[in-house]
Amino acid sequence: MAARQGSPGSADSPGSADSPGSLAARVTYLLEPKNWLIVTVVGVGAHAKGLAGAGWGLLAAFFAAVLPTLFIAYGIRRGRWEDRNVGDRGPRLVVLAFIVASVAAGLILLAVLGAPALLTGYLAFTLASVAALAAITLVWKISIHCAVAAGSVTILALLYGPLVFGGYLLVGLLGWSRVTVRDHTVLQVVGGSVLGAAAAALAYAAL
């Protein structure tokens, strides 16, 4: 059975701790969307308003990353899906719907409390991107991991400078891992990466 657990212990077969599948599962686990989102919203907030903006970013991260992660973990415990990657279409749409609701709630709260406009604007584009990914998921299993990763690298590079574009090496590594654990095809990985980068570039241009 292919490694699909998205955790450090996953592997292609028993005892294959050093196999490509095991390494790919570890990469998937370390570079999952939650981690990218936390770094990105804190980075966007800090760029907008320094240390105070980073604090706003942490609040945004709670709704964009922490709450969805807790929801996924709850679903695993209840047996509603088998792993953190939520590969099946039906459960995947349920998770995406929860993420949309969570990000929307966070966006409203940040706007009401007076968070930096750059951060609330980016969160609004994140909300639109998740909705687009959900719509695509109805017909095609696009890589959400790669969409989030590529979008994060793009927006941070545009804000902080071209050296951050080196993060695309991590996006490529993540894409390899998603194909190796057989959760996605190469085309699905490329499609997710292109969509994520394009959405982030559009957000930057608009904001």
Image (spheres, helix red, strand yellow):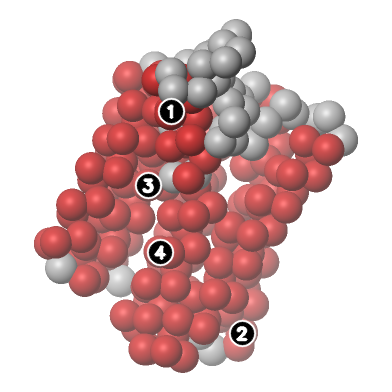
Which amino acid type is marked by label 2? Val
Q: Residue at x 59, y 31 (%)?
A: 9
Q: Residue 192: percent from the left, percent from the top?
A: 37, 34
**Mark whose residue sits in front, 1 or 4:** 1
Q: Is residue 43 left or right of residue 16?
A: left
Relative to 14, residue 159 above or below = below
Q: CA distance from mark 1 to mark 4?
A: 23 Å
Q: Earlier in the sequence, mark 1 or mark 4?
A: 1
On the image, numbered disc 3 is attached to which residue? 149
On the image, numbered disc 4 is attached to which residue? 40
On the image, numbered disc 1 is attached to which residue? 24
Relative to 198, residue 75 above or below = above
On the image, numbered disc 2 is attached to which residue? 112
Q: Dividing the image into 4 quarters, which one contains the C terminus?
A: bottom left
Which amino acid type is marked by label 4? Thr
Q: CA distance from mark 2 to mark 3?
A: 28 Å
Helix, strand or loop status at disc 1:
helix
Q: Nearer the viewer, residue 155 or 135?
A: 155
Q: Residue at x 14, y 61 (%)?
A: 163
